[in-house]
Amino acid sequence: MTISETQQQIIDEFSIFDDWLDKYNLLIEMGRDVPLIDAQYKSNNHLITGCQSRVWLHAGFQDGNVIFTADSDAVITKGIVHLLIRVMSNHTPDEILSADLSFLDAIGLKEHLSPTRSNGLVSMVKQMKLYAQVYKLKSNS
């Protein structure tokens, strides 16, 4: 599935609900499915700065694709990182780097997050794209 197709799938899932309380509940449910980071990567080296809660993110590279795993100590944040992983994991560095992530605006997530959670979201996206950039450079050398 392409990044665009996955984004559309998420938009469709969130569009079922009108109330943001229901959307938050969906986000919490999704957080239960986040591909969990291996315990060895749950360290300060993999901690994303700028997040209200603690979020650990790890990226691996397999068959030309970046594979993300994560964990967080907050259920909403776990849901957010799950969405990002769902969209960007198992794609090439170029696909990740060129992804516009328009689904974040389409589902209204950015406007319904607190400023600190919104900063955390930006930090997560930045870190994922940074991993993609590193793997792109490694694979080109």
Image: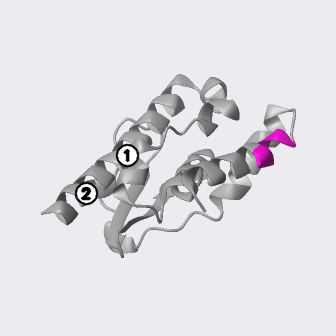
Magenta residue span: 12-16
Residue 135 — which label?
none
Give the structural element (helix, strand or loop) at label 2. Answer: helix
Our reading of the magenta stretch's main secondary structure is helix
> Image quadrant for the C terminus?
bottom left
Could you tell whether 10 is left or right of 20 in the image? left
Residue ID at (30%, 54%): 131
Could you tell whether 110 is left or right of 41 in the image? right
Residue ID at (53%, 39%): 101
**Residue type pointed to by label 1:** Leu
- Above or below: residue 60 compared with residue 129: below
Counting from the top left corner in percent of width and height, residue 59 is at: 35, 63
CB within 8 Å, label 2 to label 1:
yes
Residue 13 included in the magenta stretch of the image: yes
Residue 83 included in the magenta stretch of the image: no
Between residue 99 and residue 19, name the one nearer to us: 99
Counting from the top left corner in percent of width and height, residue 19 is at: 86, 32
Residue ID at (53%, 50%): 84
The total of numbered circles placed on residues is: 2
**Residue type pointed to by label 2:** Lys
Between residue 12 and residue 110, name the one nearer to us: 12
The residue at which mark 2 appears reads as: 136
The answer to which quarter of the image holds residue 102 is top right
- Above or below: residue 132 compared with residue 49: below
The residue at which mark 1 appears reads as: 97
Between residue 26 and residue 103, name the one nearer to us: 103
